[in-house]
Image (tube, rainbow, N blue to C red):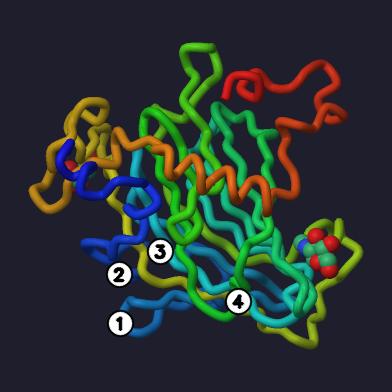
Amino acid sequence: MASLLLLVPSLFSLFLLVPASVGNFYNDFDLAWGDGRANVLNNGDLLTLSLDRASGSGFQSKNEYLFGKIDMQLKLVPGNSAGTVAAYYLSSRGATWDEIDFEFLGNVSGDPYIVHTNVFSQGKGNRLQQFYLWFNPTTDFHTYSILWNPRSIIFSVDGTPIREFKNMGSSGIPFPNSQPMRIYSSLWNADDWATRGGLVKTDWNLAPFTASYRNFNADACIWSNGTSSCNSPATSSASSSGSSSSYWLSLQLDSTGQHRMKWVQKNYMIYNYCTDTERFPQGLPPECNLS
Ligand SMILES: *[C@@H]1O[C@H](CO)[C@@H](O)[C@H](O)[C@H]1NC(C)=O
Ligand SMILES: *[C@@H]1O[C@H](CO)[C@@H](O)[C@H](O)[C@H]1NC(C)=O
């Protein structure tokens, strides 16, 4: 593993590598809802979700994962997408669930999308960070990645880290590290809040709205029947199946990654719960003072 990390000096460049094995939407996902509005095309290489006045649509992974480096390419609803929201996230089940979210808030044609990120641990979220993107996410596919290992959760866009949520469990802050999660995505109407706080409504004359997905890749520990495909997740750096190394299980942001993330946060961050003293008059959440 050490030699791999030397060859590939930063998380930034790791995410730019072509995935070793690209998933197939037929094998890896179920069309969960939407009554024909979710579709797998091109022999499993492409998935589309659509939304019209009657319904949105969604899909979910067949597997549950407990840690992984999960990449997906998305092309968001083009043109006037105001009122629409595409969510792409990992979630466990139950009342004390864990969740790692990307959420894409549509906008009037020419105005920028907003990306929401959030982390729930043991049913508690309230950790919103919002960003603009540095490109138009509707003209091409772009890669949205979640690295989730026992040390941190890192959100990246086209290989650039935008957010890190570290495991500060030793300070009593719960970290998602025991509940297996599935991958979910959905496209739905949220024009009561999504665009300019709900001022701009969905224009149903433009329906159906469509978002596209491709090049899913999960270097991940699959959870099945109470066991992980990575035999001992916390320590293993060797391949569990012989096909791919699990270098990502101990990966953290290096100085290049930190630098890139600071650049994004300085130039593209719109909102950070960790600076919202109005929302948390009793004091900011504890992780805000530690990271
Ligand atoms: C939509 O564009 C306007 C600027 O034209 C901006 O204020 C707003 O934050 C953008 N995004 C959303 C989701 O409202
Ligand atoms: C998990 O258990 C079920 C029955 O309890 C069995 O049918 C299935 O093959 C098992 N899966 C694996 C991957 O071992």
- Is residue 191 visible in the rendered image? The answer is no
Mark positioned earlier in the residue sequence (3 or 4): 3
Q: Residue at x 71, y 84 (%)?
A: 207
Residue that sits furthest to the bottom in the current view: 205
Kindly state the secondary structure of the residue where label 3 is placed: strand
Q: Residue visible at 69% across and 78% down?
A: 52
> Tags 3 and 2 in contact by the CB under 8 Å rule?
no
Per the model, the C-alpha gap separating discs 1 and 3 is 15 Å
Q: To which residue does mark 3 refer?
A: 30
Q: Residue at x 65, y 25 (%)?
A: 288
Label 4 belongs to which residue?
Answer: 138
- Upstream in sequence: badge 1 or badge 2: 2
Q: CA distance from mark 1 to mark 2?
A: 8 Å
Question: Residue 211 at x, y = what percent?
Answer: 57, 74
Task: Kindly identify which residue carries mark 1.
Answer: 43
Q: Label 4 sits on what residue type?
A: Thr
Nearest-to-viewer mark from 1 and 4:
4
User: Relative to residue 76, is residue 15 depicted above or below?
Assistant: above
Given the current orientation, which residue lies at the most extreme top position?
Answer: 171
Q: Residues within 10 Å of mark 4 (few under 14, many from 20)?
A: some
Q: Residues within 10 Å of mark 1 (few under 14, many from 20)?
A: few
The image position of residue 68, as x and y in percent, is 34, 44
Q: Which residue is mark 2?
A: 24
